[in-house]
Image (cartoon, rainbow, N blue to C red):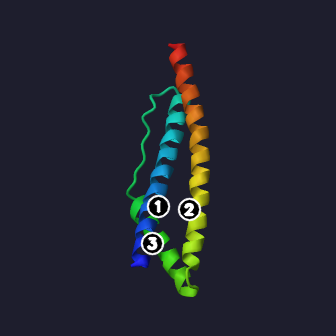
Amino acid sequence: MESSILYFLLLVTSFALCCAGSYQEILRGNIVHLQNGREPNAGVALFPTIPFVQAMHFGIVYGLNLAQENLGWYVITVYFSLAILCLCYMISKLKAEYNKLVFEKANKA
């Protein structure tokens, strides 16, 4: 029972990480669009990321747990924590740059 809940949380956290990474890439694309004088309408493809990243996370956790009890959970928890912190930091920087470019574009018109 306890293990199935942890695997469900792994799945949810992995999806959240993919969504945050996709949002970061959309911001990057929109910044490039604005820098080149285009409308900010960038997008990303979620298909290659969604099933493969979750499978990779499950495989890593399962393999490490086979090697030593609960090692996979410790490793993936540290990884997710650091990844989310880094993504939040990068998103805040990109969001500030994006807002600055939108403001400059609005003032030119």
Please, is residue 7 above or below residue 65 in the view? above
Residue beneath disc 2: 80
Q: In this view, does 73 lie to the left or right of 9?
A: right
Residue at 56% x, 62% y is 80
Residue furthest toward the bottom? 67
- Quarter of the image holding residue 5? bottom left
**Secondary structure beneath disc 2?**
helix
Amino acid type of disc 2?
Phe
Residue at 53% x, 20% y is 105
Please, is residue 88 above or below residue 69 in the view? above
Please, is residue 7 above or below residue 95 in the view? below
Residue at 44% x, 66% y is 9
Amino acid type of disc 3?
Leu
**Secondary structure beneath disc 3?**
helix
What numbered label is drawn on residue 98?
Answer: none
Residue 74 x, y percent position in the rendering: 59, 73
Residue 30 x, y percent position in the rendering: 49, 35
Residue beneath disc 3: 6
Crowding around mark 3 (Cα neighbors within 10 Å: few <14, some 14 to 19, many 20+) is: few
Crowding around mark 1 (Cα neighbors within 10 Å: few <14, some 14 to 19, many 20+) is: some
35 or 90, which lies in front?
90
Residue beneath disc 1: 13
